Image: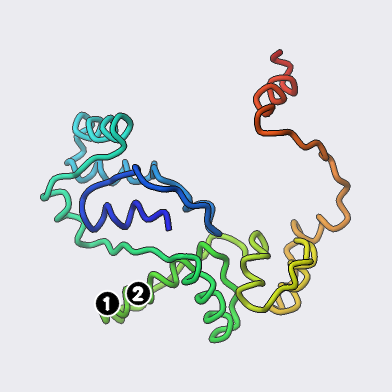
Amino acid sequence: ENNVLTDCFRTGTYDKNRDFFVTSSPSMDILVSSNLERLIFHLTGDNDVATSELMTSLNTTGLYKISDDMLAELTGFYADFADEGDISEEIAATFKGDHYVEDPHTAVASAVYKKYLAETQDKTPTVIVSTASPYKFPKVVVESLTPLTGEEDDFDLVKKLEEMSGTPLPKAVSELFDAPALHDRVVPAAEMQSDVERYLALD
């Protein structure tokens, strides 16, 4: 839903002056994409001065607009986005069709690929690379596959996911069940800086 990149690829304007949404795909919850700067640099003909001017505009005004020639070079890209409903539906559909459990980030890619297929009818064989484990997002994944009571904690959810998927818990997850709690301190947001400074012996 933080679809700033989709808009940029479609219009040539990168505008971060918009509402920010916390979604089930936290690595995509950004309004400033650091990776895009590399592509912009390429589109300027590897011109560091022109790239710097665009990035400065983003920092000072919250937006920049690439030239029509630069936008034309993006025709080899396809951009779209998936909202929370799309993600949940994609997790459920992929599990039902292929008995494969997607994490939310992969579900975004898979849902957008289906939009691409519907729009272009391009049947080129395609690989969607999954880079996250569904066990990192047990609530989002499990509630996409089955109703929840609301009483489940994360340990209940990963066990449920293991049972539903038939995929053993990764060692890093299974070890957490017996791991001792190392930290139990809760810090109010207003006191975070002073607590970090105290922890680092900076005060």
* Color encoding of the figure: rainbow
- Most extreme residue toward the top is 203
Q: Residue 22 vs residue 57: left or right?
A: right
Disc 2 and disc 1 in contact, CB within 8 angstroms: yes
Out of 120 and 24, give the one closest to the viewer. Answer: 24
Question: Can you give x and y, in whole percent of width and height, for residue 17 in the image?
Answer: 34, 42
Q: Residue 142 vs residue 93: left or right?
A: right
- Element at badge 2? helix
Residue that numbered label 1 is attached to:
119
Residue drawn at x 21%, y 38% is 46
- Element at badge 1? helix
Looking at the rendered structure, the kind of residue marked 2 is: Lys
Looking at the rendered structure, the kind of residue marked 1 is: Glu
Q: Residues within 10 Å of mark 1 (few under 14, many from 20)?
A: few
Residue that numbered label 2 is attached to:
115
Q: Residue 123 vs residue 137: left or right?
A: left
Question: Can you give x and y, in whole percent of width and height, for residue 60 in the image?
Answer: 30, 29
Question: Can you give x and y, in whole percent of width and height, for residue 162 in the image?
Answer: 74, 73
